[in-house]
Image (cartoon, rainbow, N blue to C red):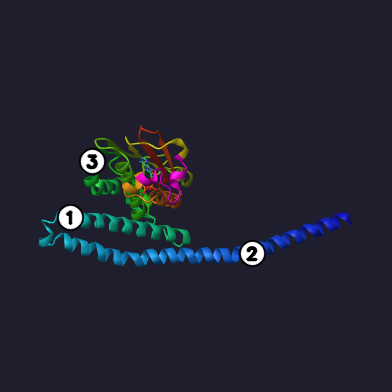
C-alpha cells in the first residue's frame, strides 16, 4: 500500500508539473514570439525612412551653397555617420529576429570561399587604407564548398571589419583559409560518405590589434555585448556583429572561438564542414 501510494503521489506530481509548465510556457512563449515579431517588423519598417534620410543628406552634401559652410558640412557628416549606424543596427536586429524564428532557410550552394574572401577584402580595402593597415589573404587558389554565399560573406565582413576596427593604425590583418580532413582536396573519387563527412574548412582572421582579455572570450559572442562600451560606440559598434557571426557558423554546423591576449592582437578561428 505504501508503494502504491508512492507511485500515485509521483504520478500526480508529474501530471501537475506537466500541467503547470504548459500553463506557464504557453503565454510566455506566445509573448516571446510577439516580441520577436515586433522587433522584426520594427527594424524592417525603419529601413525605408533611414534610406530616405541618407539620400536627403547626400543631396544636401552636394548642394553648392553649402560648399563653403564648414559648420553645416560637419553636422551633415555627423548625421550621415549616425544614420549609417542606425541602418546597420536595424539590419542586424532584423537578421537576429529572423534567426530566432528558425524560419531562415540556409542556402547550400556550391561556392568558392577564396573568391568570396577576395570580394570581401576588396570591399573593406578603403577602411584598411584609411588606417594604413596591411591586409593579407593566405588561401589556396580555390576553396570549393557548399554553403550560403550571402551569410558566409557576411561572416567574413564581420570578422575582418572588427579586425580593422580594433587594430591601431599601421598594423596588420590576415585572413588564412585551408581545407583539411579526409576528402578535402575535392576530386579524388576515393572519398566514401564517411570520409567526406570528415572534411572541413578552417578560417582564421588575425589582427595585431588591442586584443581581448581572457574573461571576455565567451561573452563577446552574446548580443549587445561590447567590451568597453564607450570605446566601441565611438568605433560605431553596437555589439551584435559577433552574435550574428556565431549564428551563421552554428547554422553551418561549425564552431567559432577566439584566441587573444590584451595588446597582442586577436585571432578568430572558424571551422565549418565543407559540404
Ligand atoms: P561591435 O559592434 O561592438 O564591434 P561585435 O559583436 O562585433 O560588436 O564585437 C563585440 C566586442 O568584441 C567588441 O565590442 C569588442 O570589444 C570585441 N572585439 C571583437 N572583435 C575584436 C577584435 N578583432 N579585437 C579586439 N576586440 C574585438
Q: Nearer the viewer, residue 19 or 148?
A: 19
Res 12 → quadrant: bottom right
Residue 20 on image: x %, y %: 67, 63
Tell me: 201 left or right of 52: right
Spot occupied by residue 69 in the image (x, y as percentages of width and height): 13, 56
Categorize mark 1 by other alpha carbons within 10 Å: few (<14), some (14-19), many (20+). Answer: few
Identify the secondary structure beneath mark 2: helix
Q: Which residue is mark 3?
A: 131
Residue placed at 29% from the left, 46% from the top? 117
Q: Which residues are magenta?
A: 216-230
Which of pointers 1 and 3 lies earlier in the amino acid sequence?
1
Asked whether residue 149 appears in the rendered view, the answer is yes
Residue shown at 59%/66% (left/top)? 26
Residue on which disc 2 sits: 22
Disc 1: which residue: 71
- Up-down: is 37 above or below 140? below
Residue 255 image offset from top left, x and y in percent? 45, 44
Q: CA distance from mark 2 to mark 1?
A: 60 Å
* Element type where label 3 sits in the image: loop
- In this rendered view, identify the residue nearer to me: 155 or 185: 155
**Residue 165 or 267: which is nearer the viewer?**
165
Query: Image quadrant of ligand 1?
Result: top left
Circle nearer the N terminus (2, 3): 2
Q: Secondary structure at mark 1?
A: helix
Amino acid at each position: 500500500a505504501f508503494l502504491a501510494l508512492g507511485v500515485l503521489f509521483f504520478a500526480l506530481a508529474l501530471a501537475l508539473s506537466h500541467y503547470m509548465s504548459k500553463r506557464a510556457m504557453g503565454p510566455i512563449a506566445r509573448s516571446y514570439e510577439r516580441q520577436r515579431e515586433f522587433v522584426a517588423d520594427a527594424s524592417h519598417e525603419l529601413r525605408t525612412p533611414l534610406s530616405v534620410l541618407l539620400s536627403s543628406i547626400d543631396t544636401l552634401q552636394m548642394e553648392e551653397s553649402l560648399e563653403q559652410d564648414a559648420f553645416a558640412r560637419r553636422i551633415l557628416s555627423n548625421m550621415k555617420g549616425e544614420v549609417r549606424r542606425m541602418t546597420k543596427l536595424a539590419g542586424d536586429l532584423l537578421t537576429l529576429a529572423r534567426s530566432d524564428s528558425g524560419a531562415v532557410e540556409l542556402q547550400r550552394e556550391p561556392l568558392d570561399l577564396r573568391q568570396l574572401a577576395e570580394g570581401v577584402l576588396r570591399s573593406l580595402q578603403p577602411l584598411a587604407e584609411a588606417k594604413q593597415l596591411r591586409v593579407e589573404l593566405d588561401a589556396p587558389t580555390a576553396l570549393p564548398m557548399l554553403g550560403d554565399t550571402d551569410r558566409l560573406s557576411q561572416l567574413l565582413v564581420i570578422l575582418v571589419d572588427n579586425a580593422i576596427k580594433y587594430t591601431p593604425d599601421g598594423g596588420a590583418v590576415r585572413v588564412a583559409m585551408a581545407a583539411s580532413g579526409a576528402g578535402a582536396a575535392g576530386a579524388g573519387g576515393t572519398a566514401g560518405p564517411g570520409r567526406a563527412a570528415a572534411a572541413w574548412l578552417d578560417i582564421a582572421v588575425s589582427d595585431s590589434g588591442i586584443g581581448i582579455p581572457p574573461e571576455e572570450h565567451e561573452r563577446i559572442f552574446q548580443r549587445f555585448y561590447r567590451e568597453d562600451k564607450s570605446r566601441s560606440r565611438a568605433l560605431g559598434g553596437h555589439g551584435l556583429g559577433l552574435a550574428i557571426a556565431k549564428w551563421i557558423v552554428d547554422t553551418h554546423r561549425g564552431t567559432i572561438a577566439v584566441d587573444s591576449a590584451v595588446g597582442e592582437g586577436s585571432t578568430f578561428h572558424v571551422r565549418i564542414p565543407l559540404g
